[in-house]
Amino acid sequence: MTRPLRLAINGASGRMGSALLDLLGADDRFTLVHAVVAAESAHDGRPVFPGAADSLRYAHEWSHAPAIDVVIDFSGPTGLAAALDHCQIHGTALVSGTTGLDAALEARLADAGKRMAVLRAANFSLGVAVLTRLLREAAAALRAWDVEIVEAHHGRKQDAPSGTALALGRVAADARQTTLERAAVYHREGRTGERNDGSIGFAVVRGGDIVGEHTAMLVGMGERLELIHRATDRSIFARGAMQAAYWLAGREPGHWQLDDVIATPR
Ligand code: NAD
């Protein structure tokens, strides 16, 4: 049997980091060798797995990190920048879900693909990755059908439509050789007039504890296709990131997508 991959988690004490740690216990594909948290974190220096005799401790730097096959990052822009420094020097594969990067960090990441394998996703759900693939195909095949995207989330969500809904809209627009900027309709109220051919409409539901639901509707004359994804647990993002890390470790330098992971399973 091949040895487990040596994994580092950046942002190990956060919501996503904790979800990753929960899954690691039952996953023999990986050995956790480094767990990084923010410098001011109360976790710094504490054991990552309480009770284990030779337990790994939370660190806030990369300088004394052991050999690593792949890093999973769910931290923040500053944390990602530090992990990127380390990965670039060592050519270590990097899976990152961190959002909200500025243009300079985006440019650094784009350049890093020359020296290391990088896989980023705004949504690490494997189900959403497959939905995206199906929508691309359906929007191209059913070219005259109307596309509408409906999303639902809990009431605390700050933005609308969700980033995933926008990404789905972008894929549908792209499949029809247009752009989301040209095709999107975000508001309908009062005397809207008839639906414009080729437009992509968005509708948003907010309430309760809905984790995240996305429906892509393709509406024809006398028939309708609906592609629906429902998330019931946030651990799906951690599960998808681990699948991506397993897939990415040892790959040649470049930028990879979650779509590559589902297209060619390892
Ligand atoms: P969180 O605030 O719960 O956790 C952040 C973690 O990062 C903590 O462990 C913190 O100590 C660590 N951290 C912060 N600054 C750091 C630094 N400079 N160096 C090292 N570690 C640092 O956040 P979260 O909810 O786990 O989300 C983290 C990121 O992942 C956010 O950008 C979020 O938008 C993104 N996210 C992406 C997906 C996806 O599927 N792509 C899903 C959920 C969250």
Image: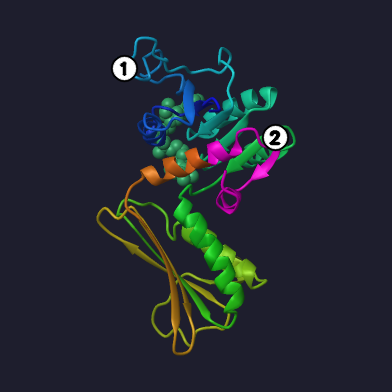
| Highlighted range, magenta | 244-266
Instruction: Residue lying at the far front in this picture: please name it.
Output: 1
Q: Earlier in the sequence, mark 1 or mark 2?
A: 1
**Would you name the residue on which mark 1 appears?**
50
At x 56% / y 12%, what residue is drawn? Answer: 64
Q: Position of residue 198 (x, y in %)?
A: 58, 79
> Residue 208: within the magenta?
no
Q: Residue at x 39, y 27 (%)?
A: 13
Between 256 and 155, the one nearer to me in the picture: 256
Q: Quadrant of the C terminus?
A: top right
> Residue at left 39%, top 82%?
190
Query: In the rendering, at what x and y percent does residue 142 appear?
Result: 57, 79
Residue 166 visible in image: no
Mark in the foreground, 1 or 2: 1
Residue labelled with disc 2: 112
Q: Is residue 242 above or below residue 68?
A: below
